[in-house]
Image (cartoon, rainbow, N blue to C red):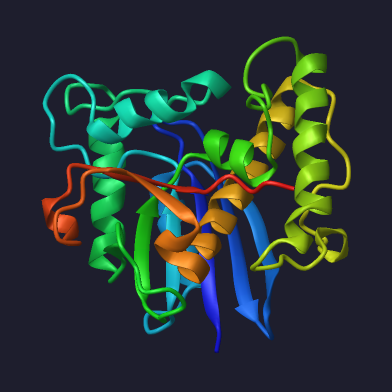
Amino acid sequence: MTMKFIGIDLGWRSQPSGLCCLKWINGELQLLDLDRKEAIADILTWIDQSVQPDEPAIIAVDAPTLIPNATGSRLADKLSHKYFGKYHAGCYPANQNLSFAERTINFGLQLESRGFAHAPTIEPQKLGRYQIEVFPHPAIVNLFNLERILKYKKGRINERRLELIKLQNYLLDILPSLSPPLRSLRLCGSFPSEIPTTGAALKAVEDKLDSLVCAYVAAYWWYWGEQRNLVLGDVYDGHSCDTTGYIIIPHRILS
């Protein structure tokens, strides 16, 4: 049985996006690719090359792809602050009047046109083609049992770099010990061996590592379903067409 897990750290406006492809094979996850693209067309081409038309996969997107509300914020956004605000991990509110909405909604529709159905509920380890919305910050807090987010997105470059080194080490040292296990990233040429010291290069690595977190959350959702994951948002009878948006976050893993 093989299954692929795609992580997309989507640039909400015109920024580049981090891209990751993991594959489930022989009882473990393997990193196949870690990349970064700017244009939506190039991202979709990368997806089409990474996942064949009849191949099972989950695509986890760090962006709101379901936004039915014209103003305000979605229930999923509000719940992220309720449950993860104390970790500084509440998400940005989404509504249709915000400048990024058209881009992120259309990206979800492009995935639907490729057969990737929204999966706010899932039968664990059932092969299929799915898409989900994820959010790396609370996922990192829960997977690595942290007391606050890793603050690698804002601040001075040297401070961001130190936080990104922490994330790199957690990915290297902890993900191989979880279920599903991720095969040692030290064996993968595309995984960054060092964290850069300049702003642009640091941002590129940040995007890639975020996409890897997204891909792992996709695998965790597929492997465990609701047994070990939270679904933030409203899901009526399991029908994605009736949800106003949802975010999948792994349960907290206690050592």
Between 171 and 199, the residue placed more toward the observer is 171
Vertical position of residue 244 compared to residue 225: above or below? above
Between 61 and 250, the residue placed more toward the observer is 250
Q: Where is residue 239 in the image (x, y as percent from the top left)?
A: 16, 61
- Farthest bottom residue? 1
Q: Residue at coordinates 48% horizontally, 28% vertically from top-left? A: 84
- Farthest front residue? 255
Quarter placement of the N terminus: bottom right
Q: Where is residue 216 in the image (x, y as percent from the top left)?
A: 59, 57
Q: Is residue 42 left or right of residue 98?
A: right
Q: Where is residue 115 in the image (x, y as percent from the top left)?
A: 28, 71
Q: Where is residue 116 in the image (x, y as percent from the top left)?
A: 31, 67
* Residue 207 seen by the camera: no
* Residue 165 seen by the camera: yes
Q: Residue at coordinates 41% horizontally, 58% vertically from top-left? A: 44
Q: In this view, does 102 lie to the left or right of 17?
A: left
Vertical position of residue 127 compared to residue 75: above or below? below
Q: Residue at coordinates 74% horizontally, 31% vertically from top-left? A: 201
